C-alpha cells in the first residue's frame, strides 16, 4: 500500500489540476493538498524501496531493472517536488496564474506521471519476471 498510494494519488492530483484549470481556480486548495500528499507519500515509498532493495539478490539483468526502477522513482519524486513548490508559490501569491506557469505545471505533471508509470512498469517487471516479493509484516 505504501508504494501504490503515491501512484494513485498522483493521477488523482493531475485530474484535479485539470478540473482546477477548467473551473478557473475552484480546486486551488485541493490541488495543493493532493500534490502535498503525493510528495510526502513518495518520500516514504522511495525510502522504503531503497531500504528493501538492499536485501535483494538479483541477476545482472534484474539489478539493471532495479536500478531503473529506483531512478524512475527518484525522478518522479524530484519532478513532483518542483510541482509542489510551484503550486505553493501560486497558492501563496493569491493572484491569477499566468498561462505560461499553467503550461509549465501541466508539462511537469506529465513528466512526473511518465516517471511514475515507468517506475510501476519496472516494479511489475521485478515482481513478475524476477520474482521479487517483499515480506508482509
Image (cartoon, rainbow, N blue to C red):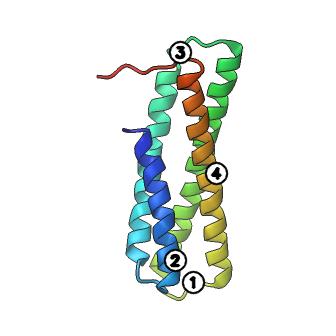
Residue 30 sits in quarter: bottom left
> Looking at the image, is 113 positioned above or below residue 130?
below
Q: Indicate the secondary structure of the residue bearing disc 2.
A: helix
Q: Indicate the secondary structure of the residue bearing disc 4.
A: helix
The local crowd at label 1, few if under 14, some if 14 to 19, many if 20 or more residues have their Cα within 10 Å, is some
Which residue is identified by label 3?
A: 56
Of callouts 1 and 4, the N-terminal one: 1
Q: Residue furthest left?
A: 137
Alpha carbons under labels 1 and 3: distance apart? 46 Å
> Which residue corresponds to the image point at 29% horizontal and 22% vertical from the top-left?
137
Total residue callouts = 4
Q: Which mark's residue is nearer the viewer, 2 or 3? A: 3
Residue 90 is labelled as 2
> Which residue corresponds to the image point at 45% horizontal and 20% vertical from the top-left?
133
Alpha carbons under labels 1 and 2: distance apart? 7 Å
82 or 16: nearer the viewer: 16
Alpha carbons under labels 4 and 3: distance apart? 26 Å
Which residue is identified by label 1?
A: 97
Of callouts 4 and 3, the N-terminal one: 3
The picture places residue 33, in percent across and down from the top left corner, at 38, 65
Marks 3 and 2: in contact by CB < 8 Å?
no
Q: Which mark's residue is nearer the viewer, 1 or 3? A: 3
Marks 2 and 1: in contact by CB < 8 Å?
yes
Which residue is identified by label 4?
A: 114
The picture places residue 120, in percent across and down from the top left corner, at 56, 39
Of callouts 2 and 3, the N-terminal one: 3
> Which residue corresponds to the image point at 52% horizontal and 73% vertical from the top-left?
18
Q: Indicate the secondary structure of the residue bearing disc 3.
A: loop
The picture places residue 121, in percent across and down from the top left corner, at 60, 37
Amino acid at each position: 500500500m505504501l508504494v501504490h498510494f503515491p501512484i494513485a494519488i498522483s493521477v488523482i492530483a493531475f485530474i484535479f489540476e485539470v478540473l482546477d484549470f477548467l473551473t478557473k481556480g475552484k480546486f486551488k486548495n485541493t490541488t495543493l493538498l493532493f500534490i502535498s500528499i503525493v510528495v510526502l507519500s513518495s518520500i516514504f515509498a522511495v525510502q522504503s524501496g531503497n531500504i528493501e532493495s538492499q536485501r535483494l539478490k538479483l541477476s545482472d539483468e534484474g539489478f539493471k531493472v532495479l536500478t531503473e526502477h529506483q531512478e524512475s522513482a527518484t525522478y518522479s519524486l524530484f519532478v513532483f517536488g518542483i510541482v509542489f513548490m510551484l503550486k505553493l508559490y501560486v497558492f501563496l501569491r493569491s493572484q491569477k496564474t499566468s498561462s505560461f506557469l499553467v503550461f509549465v505545471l501541466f508539462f511537469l505533471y506529465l513528466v512526473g506521471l511518465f516517471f511514475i508509470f515507468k517506475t510501476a512498469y519496472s516494479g511489475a517487471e521485478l515482481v513478475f519476471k524476477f520474482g521479487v516479493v517483499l515480506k508482509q509484516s
